[in-house]
């Protein structure tokens, strides 16, 4: 069985590879800004789920119906505000100045599509950020690693130095919840092992 990942995220690919799956990478092209504007009053969990669904459906239309397609989107909820990728060193430093020493909720929306049907769910994990020093924040931002990461951090690389602990699913913090995807595959009648790269 082939599994298509509607993303070019190296972190999501890493999770699947580590779990025995070699996905087809097919980044989705959706107007995220327009979608976010339309969801301005939606609950945070619905917002990330809608982004994931848009990505999965955009890609699923390019494959046979019997292909499993996964779309994901992650954002950090801090002080009631959803935050995506910072994109710049300056914005990354600002984000870290706001979140250092605090806790926030990382939301990762998932949409798994198969045979015209979808399973849409959001994983929520509480992240406890370290009280990182200004020097370390600046150095971390300068590496470029967190610029294209939701919440301006990684758990599995340099950013791991600055995460004191998490409460929830570690794989969802990296970008794709294996437990959630497993439940979706079971829903469609598959076993996880059907997708292992043997």
Image (spheres, rainbow, N blue to C red):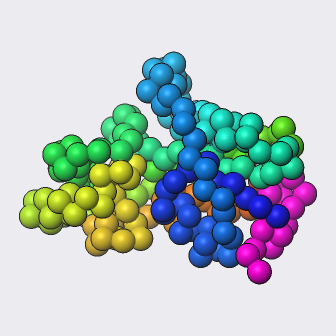
**Is 74 in the magenta?**
no
User: To which quarter of the image does residue 91 belong?
Assistant: top left
Q: Position of residue 7 (x, y in %)?
A: 56, 50
At a point 57% along the width and 68% down the height, the residue shown is: 15
Q: Is residue 86 visible?
A: yes
Residue at the farthest right position: 189
In the shown orientation, is residue 172 left or right of residue 193? left
Instruction: Give me the residue at 54% from left, 60% from top.
Output: 12
- Residue 89 lies, in percent from the top left, at 19, 50
Q: Which residues are magenta?
A: 185-198
Q: Nearer the viewer, residue 7 or 154?
A: 7
Q: Is residue 22 left or right of residue 158?
A: right
The residue located at (83%, 39%) in the rendering is: 117
Residue 97 placement, left or right of 21: left
Q: Is residue 47 left or right of residue 189?
A: left
The location of residue 112, given as percent across then percent down, is: 72, 47
In-front residue for pair 143/118: 143
């Amino acid at each position: 069985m082939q599994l298509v990942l509607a993303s070019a995220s190296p972190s999501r690919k890493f999770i699947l590879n580590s779990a025995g799956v070699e996905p087809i990478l097919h980044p989705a092209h959706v107007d995220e800004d327009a979608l976010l504007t339309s969801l301005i009053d939606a609950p945070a969990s619905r917002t990330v789920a809608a982004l994931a669904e848009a990505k999965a459906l955009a890609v699923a239309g390019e494959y046979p119906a019997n292909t499993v397609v996964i779309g994901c989107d992650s954002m950090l909820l801090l002080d009631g505000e959803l935050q995506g990728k910072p994109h710049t060193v300056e914005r990354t430093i600002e984000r870290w100045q706001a979140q250092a020493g605090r806790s926030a909720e990382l939301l990762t929306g998932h949409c798994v599509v198969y045979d015209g049907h979808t399973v849409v769910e959001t994983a929520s994990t509480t992240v406890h950020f370290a009280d990182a020093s200004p020097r370390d924040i600046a150095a971390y931002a300068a590496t470029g690693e967190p610029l294209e990461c939701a919440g301006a951090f990684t758990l599995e690389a340099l950013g791991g130095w600055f995460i004191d602990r998490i409460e929830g699913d570690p794989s969802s913090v990296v970008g794709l919840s294996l437990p959630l995807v497993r439940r979706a595959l079971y829903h469609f009648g598959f076993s996880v092992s059907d997708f292992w790269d043997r």
